[in-house]
Structure formats: structure tokens, C-alpha cells
Image (spheres, rainbow, N blue to C red):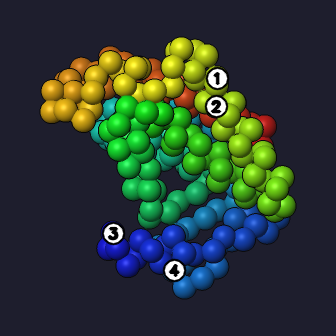
Amino acid sequence: MERRTFFKVCATSMVVSGNSLVLVGKSRANVEAKALSVIDCKDLGKTALKHFIQENHTCSESVLMAGCECLGIKADIVPDIALGLAGGIGLQGKTCGAITGGAMVLSLAIAAKEVDYMKKKMKILEAVGRLYTGFEKKYGSADCRSLCGVDLTTEQGRKAMKESVKQKKCTKFVEVASEILSEELSNYL
């Protein structure tokens, strides 16, 4: 996607009308939105894993893509907008990308339902907090480097990720984050 097109898409306004997310602005050709209703969020984990393993997307992209499919949102900027969150935000080993991708989905879902800014803000922050703490409780950490055991800023770490860590460790993180996300979405959809 060209830089100019990306900024046009990002600048497109979104307005909530009933249960639908309506896009207004000049860049409608690049973004499509459907009524926000559960398509099948029960399989969010399986869908995220398909994107993660079969399609070779990152953890953050995979969870965002599966969540957007669940919400009925299709936009050209998905999955690209989540790419920089992979590897614990730019490979720095911080918050797991499966969590940050899930945070983006929760923000989209709740923002589409709540128009009052302060209520929306608190609902989103609380839901994302539950996603984070639920994941952290399960694994004892939410940091990518602690979870996967490799330093992705090194060539050796990236090689290990590609050869075995993604399949052996990260798949369970993507699946569990997606399951927690699915539970949270059921509260808002």
C-alpha cells in the first residue's frame, strides 16, 4: 500500500449508526465495514492460528485479522497496521503481539458500540486490562522475550523463531490470547 493511500485510509472517519459501523470520507474504496455482529467468534483461536501458521503472519497480525473477521470488518490496513507490534513491539521482547493485536480488536469492537468517549475509554481499558492479566496469569508473563525465550533483535533469535519457537511455543500464546479475546468480545457483541 502506498504511503498516501495508507494515510487516507487512516484519516477516514468512522461513525456508529445503530449496530453498523459506517465509514465516511473520501477513501471508502479502501475500507469496507459490515454490521458489527458476531460472525463466529467461537473459532477465533483456530482462525488466528490459521493466519499465524498456514499464512505465516505475525502473532499481532493473526489475532487482529481473526478478530476483525469475527467483527465483520475488512480494511486494507488490516493486517499491516499490527505488523510493528510483533516480537513484543518491534522485536523488543516487550508485550506479546497476540495481546496487542487483541487490544486493537477490543478497541474496535467497543468503540463501535459506545459513543460516549469517557464510557468508551473506560470499557476499552478495562477489557484490554482483563485480556492482559488473563494471559499473564496463565503464563506468568506477558513479555515476548520471557515467553518465547529468544532475543529477536539478534539474527540468532530470529533464526530460532523461524525454525522452531514459532511452532513450538508461540502457537499456544496466539491461541490462548484469542480465546481470552473471544470471551471479552462476547461481553460486548
Circle 1 sits in a helix, a strand or a loop, which is it? helix
How many angstroms separate mark 3 from mark 1 (CA)? 35 Å
Determine which residue is flagged by label 2: 131
Q: Residue 134: give its label.
A: 1
Determine which residue is flagged by label 4: 27
* Residue 52 horizontal/vertical position (percent): 37, 35
Task: Name which residue type carries label 1.
Answer: Gly
Query: Could you say which quadrant of the image residue 162 lies in?
Result: top left
Instruction: Decide which of tag 3 and tag 2 comes sooner along the chain.
Output: 3
Instruction: Decide which of tag 3 and tag 1 comes sooner along the chain.
Output: 3
Closer mark to the observer between disc 3 and disc 1: 1
Count residues near mark 4 (Cα–Cα under 10 Å), then give few for <14, some for 14-19, many for 20+.
some
* Residue 116 horizontal/vertical position (percent): 84, 61
Callouts 3 and 4 close, C-beta under 8 Å? no
**100 sits left or right of 114 in the view:** left
Q: Residue 1: give its label.
A: 3
Circle 4 sits in a helix, a strand or a loop, which is it? loop
Count residues near mark 3 (Cα–Cα under 10 Å), then give few for <14, some for 14-19, many for 20+.
few
